[in-house]
Amino acid sequence: MTLLGRRNQLPVLRSVVPGYILDGGERGDILLPKKYVPKGLVPGGIVDVFVYRDSEDRLVATTETPHAEVGVFAFLRVASVNPRIGAFLDWGLEKDLLLPLREQLRPVGAGEWVVVHVVIDEKTDRIVASARLNRYLDLTPANYREEQEVRLLVTGETPLGYNVVVENAHRGLLYKSELSAPLTIGAPLEGFIRRVRADGKIDVALDRAGYARVAPLTEQIIDALNENDGRLPYHDGSDPEEIRAVFGVSKKAFKQAIGSLYRSRQIGISDDGIRLVRGASGNDAGKRGNGGSK
């Protein structure tokens, strides 16, 4: 079955002037325009394509990959706006994706970015976007375990923290009290399940809890010091985003780890960074660093 708004493996039926005709099964013939035909493709072969509708509402295939497919939450830029119809989003294809007026939480302008869910309009069988995210979140009880690593998408800010979509399915919350810096709406992140509440709500965090995050991080820091002549330009005052880019953790976790290493006398801390104390090694880090974090 050919899936609209998804990638499909379709047979090539024949060559025509505009390109190749693909077998769309119950959806009929689908054109793969000549500019998207991969080298060496011949009738009788199979081609991997994304199926959507062109500006004349005809089914068409492309070998290009959109920024999001049907069923996916995504952060997309508004390319243009028609005040009578809605906004058109850049999703990486020749034809922009419509965000109808009825699917907007508020009016959006060209150049803005918006978190949406890509869906098929049941009345028109067209691919559209919706900013009404709650409609598309899975409300069944989530079967996550504590400390499970998950994919997150930041969708909005609340007084308590940030709403996120967990694994493209469930709503989660990142608490501001556990963050070292503000987050960017639309940011894709890796996080961890902190707890699944009885009411179905999910608390998540960007780092593992307590000892589970500090122990491996101390080893990572020692390894990085060994690879950089015993010195690194990161310390208590470093930018949180820089810390996450380099070590993949929050600044709070980084400070706990270097505090553990400092107490176990493996590193020194100064205004220009941290340095490895002579005699400290990766093996020592695993032993003494862990002991210092208790």
Image (tube, rainbow, N blue to C red):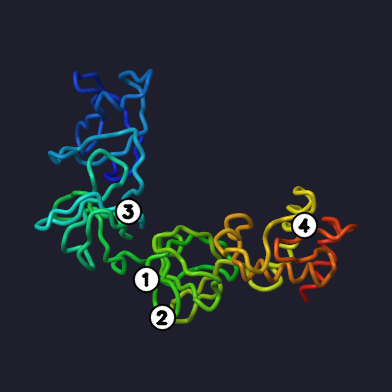
Q: Amino acid at mark 1?
A: Leu
- Are the residues at dot 4 and dot 1 in contact (C-beta closer than 8 Å)? no
Residue located at (26% from left, 44% from top): 4
Residue 49, compared with residue 133, is above or below; it is: above
Counting residues from the N terminus, which is met first, the one under dot 3 or under dot 4? 3
Mark 3 vs mark 4, CA separation in Å: 39 Å
The residue closer to the viewer here, 182 or 87, is: 182
The residue closer to the viewer here, 182 or 140, is: 182
Element marked by disc 4: helix
Q: Position of residue 87 (x, y in %)?
A: 19, 55
Query: Mark 4 — residue?
Result: 222
Foreground disc of the pair 3, 4: 4
Mark 2 vs mark 3, CA separation in Å: 25 Å
The disc label shown at residue 139, or none: 1
Quadrant of the snapshot with the C terminus: bottom right
Query: Mark 3 — residue?
Result: 76
Query: Mark 2 — residue?
Result: 159
Residue located at (27% from left, 55% from top): 119
Residue 121, compared with residue 5, is above or below; it is: below
Q: Amino acid at mark 3?
A: Leu
Image side of residue 241 versus residue 54, left or right: right
